[in-house]
Image (cartoon, rainbow, N blue to C red):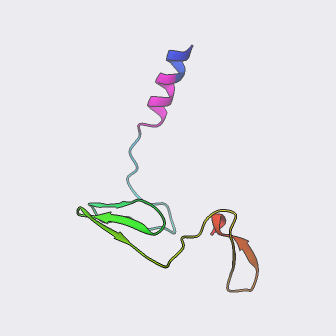
């Protein structure tokens, strides 16, 4: 039973993602996101200092003035 579960998990998670979903954009080849404020491009690490990425459980105010959860942004 355990082997079947491991095999099934491997098969279901081994698919390739070809494009970003609607509303998002594809990253250039050689770019890897490490966090909300850090990425690596062609072997160079870039970091936005003084910028806090929006984390779930942290509120933000949208353009209509409503408070929302950053994790839903």
User: Which residue extends farthest right?
Assistant: 66
* Residue at image location 49% in from the left, 66% down from the top: 36
Question: How many labels were placed on the picture?
Answer: 0
* Residue at image location 50% in from the left, 26% down from the top: 8
- Left or right, 58 with respect to 38, comes to right
Between 51 and 23, the one lying in front of the other is 51
* Residue at image location 50% in from the left, 65% down from the top: 22
Between 67 and 44, the one lying in front of the other is 44
Between 12 and 32, the one lying in front of the other is 32
User: Which residue extends farthest left?
Assistant: 42
Report x, y in % for residue 50: 49, 79
Residue segment shown in magenta: 6-14
Looking at the image, residue 32 lies above or below residue 25: above
- In the rendered image, which quarter is residue 5 located in? top right
- In the rendered image, which quarter is residue 2 located in? top right
Q: The C terminus lies in which quarter of the figure? A: bottom right
Report x, y in % for residue 30: 26, 60
Looking at the image, residue 32 lies above or below residue 67: above
Report x, y in % for residue 60: 68, 77
- In the rendered image, which quarter is residue 66 located in? bottom right
User: Which residue extends farthest front?
Assistant: 50
Report x, y in % for residue 34: 41, 59
Looking at the image, residue 4 lies above or below residue 54: above
* Residue at image location 61% in from the left, 65% down from the top: 55
Q: The N terminus lies in which quarter of the figure? A: top right
Most frequent secondary structure within the magenta stretch? helix
């Amino acid at each position: 039973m355990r082997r079947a579960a491991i095999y099934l998990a491997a098969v279901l998670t081994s698919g390739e993602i070809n494009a970003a979903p609607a509303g998002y954009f594809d990253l250039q080849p050689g770019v890897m996101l490490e966090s909300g404020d850090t990425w690596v491009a062609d072997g160079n690490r870039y970091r936005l200092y003084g910028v806090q990425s929006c984390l779930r459980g942290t509120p933000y105010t949208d353009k209509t003035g409503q408070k929302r959860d950053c994790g839903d942004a």
